[in-house]
Amino acid sequence: RRPTQPLLVERIKQGRKEPSPTTIRRLTGSFTAVLEAAGFPKYNRKLSPEEILTRGAEFRRVTGRAPSRKDTYEHDLAPGYKVIRNYFGTLKAFHEALEAYLNDEPNVTEEAA
């Protein structure tokens, strides 16, 4: 039996992890529409390099270390790996930019952009 959009909305509100976003998109045509119907705000804003570095700094403040690649996929505080790659090229370059940002060196976000 195929779940209806109202059923999918209810499952999302309950915090259930199934069906997957891919399945929801296939069944309804739009994962975003189902999220919005469940009361979640629309999220399609790109982060600036400074926002990415701020998230990296918050992760470091909480954990005591810079985010690893695994953290970028698994930890909510860490910026996503693809976002880091898009703006900084490599995780190493992000770590270097993060160190400079934490040491308050000027123009670090301009260089990353």
Image: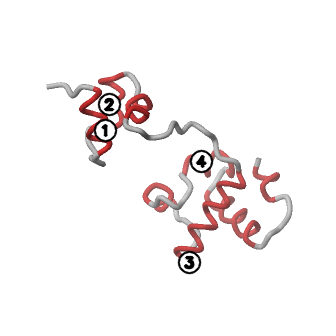
Q: What secondary structure is found at the residue carrying circle 2?
A: helix
Graded by Cα atoms within 10 Å as few (under 14), some (14 to 19) or many (20 or more), the crowding at tag 1 reads: few
- How far apart, in angstroms, are the residues tagged by discs 3 and 1? 33 Å
Report the quarter where the N terminus lies.
top left
Graded by Cα atoms within 10 Å as few (under 14), some (14 to 19) or many (20 or more), the crowding at tag 2 reads: many
| Picture quadrant of residue 5 | top left
Kindly identify the residue that appears in the image at 59 percent across and 74 percent down. Answer: 61
Callout 2 amino acid: Ile
Q: Earlier in the sequence, mark 3 or mark 4?
A: 3
Can you name the residue that lies furthest to the bottom here? 64
- How far apart, in angstroms, are the residues tagged by discs 2 and 4? 24 Å
Query: Do residues under tags 2 and 1 come within 8 Å of each other at their CB atoms?
Result: yes
State left or right for residue 92 relative to residue 73: right
- Image mark for residue 64: 3
- How far apart, in angstroms, are the residues tagged by discs 4 and 1? 22 Å
Kindly identify the residue that appears in the image at 55 percent across and 65 percent down. Answer: 67
Graded by Cα atoms within 10 Å as few (under 14), some (14 to 19) or many (20 or more), the crowding at tag 4 reads: some
Q: Position of residue 84 (x, y in %)?
A: 61, 52
Residue that carries the numbered disc 1 in the rendered image: 20
Residue that carries the numbered disc 2 in the rendered image: 24
Q: Position of residue 6 (x, y in %)?
A: 27, 29
Q: What secondary structure is found at the residue carrying circle 1?
A: loop
Query: Do residues under tags 3 and 1 come within 8 Å of each other at their CB atoms?
Result: no
Looking at this view, is 57 or 7 the one in front? 7
Callout 3 amino acid: Gly
Kindly identify the residue that appears in the image at 39 percent across and 32 percent down. Answer: 37
Residue that carries the numbered disc 4 in the rendered image: 83
Query: Do residues under tags 2 and 3 come within 8 Å of each other at their CB atoms?
Result: no
Can you name the residue that lies furthest to the left here? 1
Callout 1 amino acid: Ser
Q: Position of residue 59 (x, y in %)?
A: 56, 67
Q: Position of residue 2 (x, y in %)?
A: 19, 25
